[in-house]
Image (tube, coloured by chain):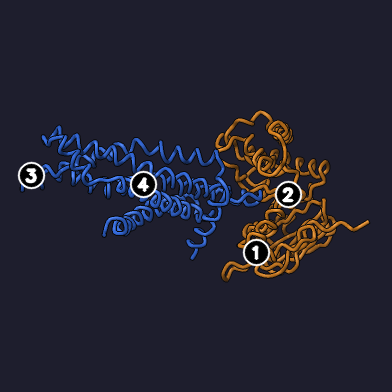
Chain colours: A orange, B blue
Amino acid sequence: MAEQQPAITLEKVCKSFGPNRVLHEVSLTLPAGKIMVMLGPSGTGKSVLLRCLVGLMKPDSGRIFIEGQDITGLDERRSAGREQMFALRRKFGMLFQDGALFDDMCVGDNVAFPLRQHAKLSEREIAARVAEDLERVGLKNAQRKMPAELSGGMRKRVAFARAIALRPKIVLCDEPSSGLDPVMSATLDELILDLHRTLGMTFVVISHDTAEARKIADYVGLLYKGELQAFGLKDEVLRSNQRAINQFFERSTEGPIQVL
Amino acid sequence: MEFLHFVRRALVAQFNGPPPRDEFVRHALDAGVGSLPLLTLLTIFAGMNLSVQAYGTFVRFGGQDLLGLFCGVGGIRELYPVMAAVICGARIGATLAASLANMQISEQVEALEVMAVDPMRLLVAPRLWAVTLMLPLLCGYADVVGLAASYWAATEQMGVNGGTFMEQVRDIVHLGDLAAGVFKGVVFGWLVAIVSCYHGYRALKRDGAEGVGVATNRAIVHSAVLCIVLNMFLSALLYVR
């Protein structure tokens, strides 16, 4: 049987904005169907990494493979490259930090949007999928509400329902627990675990939350000043006794990670 | 260069099939019907003012019967198309720029990209079509309202003979002038839409709410300046023989 391609492979990925080095030779391999939590202080390049994965930003050097396909060579200025990039992005769902819900659409239409764009489903089937996903995130009665009427936690849950509506292979979550109360954070963590179990999706979760990493991660990475300080299976990383990892998980001010 | 790159992408999106219907209808209604009250009010006063000012000058040498001629040339050829472009352009351009800038800073445009939906096709193309089609209609509407206001002021307030006024208008204003006004409307409409979409689209998340304000301001100012400057060249092209 052919070996399954890793979901994501990064090879010495570098990205700078002017003199500001955001990612420096970041390399990692994430097998398919696993949950990776990328930890790190604010402003250390976690969100940039996520944007590079989905082609919203192009690395200055290095290569990114999604299910074995090198995406760094795709030139979006050419229509063929853009088509390939769009085909690749259909493998992804993304939960943005603030939800990025469409203001002029109700909750139901927001969740239905990717289905209407890409799925060959009837309106009835779309309605059923929307209802199913909104129930999954505990918002089955919010279909007709507008995003402006929702709390921060509700917006994130709607965005989560939208991100998984097309049943993507890889779901990227940009700080899903930031700004949420502990109970709501735990609810989102349970959702990720549930989807991982039931649909076998690969998750890349950007977070500051070590409790979240302990709870849901198969793989853990720590990014600091654009460099990957640690990456591997969660238990191995936690046992590795690396100073940066210890400092982060013990919430200590003593160690290599300095307040920026 | 950045603007030219945006224009190229916008043109590809605009002419690559019909725009999304719902988005097009929404923006067309907002640009067209939404502009009517403001345009009507301002064109009425501009039209009446044109008559009043012209009468004050012409009456000195007994030329008050030429009022229709002046209102026809000055109004229909120049004033009303530019007024429609600047007034409606400011209103429409502000809406376009603010809505797109808001979508940019709240990551809605990036969300579309991630969902493999081309934002130029979904957001920019329907706005371009809507404004390009609505502004010439608004120019035509402004011609009618402005001329009617000039006529009313000339005949009711200054005692000019209505028949003479309309005869002068018919003598000087031909179908080609109306067509030229509509043509100007098409050009101004596309210009207002592309400039406004450009400024809205290039807002960055880090700019926050201020970025929306800056984009809106630039859209209004640049649209108005470009329309007025371009109007002179269009008039030279269309009327100078």
Task: State the residue lying farthest toward the left.
Answer: B61
Q: Provide the chain ID for the residue under circle 3.
A: B
Which one is in front in this view, the residue at disc 4 or the one at disc 2? 4
- Cα distance between the residues tagged 3 and 4: 32 Å
The 10 Å Cα crowd at callout 4, few under 14, some 14 to 19, many 20 or more, is: many
Q: Amino acid at mark 2?
A: Val
| Residue A169 seen | yes
Label 1 sits on a secondary structure element that is loop
Q: Amino acid at mark 1?
A: Asp
Mark 3 highlights which residue? B59
Q: Return the residue nearer the eye: A56 or A113.
A: A113
Q: Quadrant of residue B148?
A: top left
Which one is in front in this view, the residue at disc 1 or the one at disc 3? 3
Horizontal side, residue A125 vs residue B62: left or right: right
Label annotation for residue A171: 2
Q: Return the residue nearer the eye: A203 or A78.
A: A78
Q: Provide the chain ID for the residue under circle 2.
A: A
- Cα distance between the residues tagged 4 and 2: 50 Å
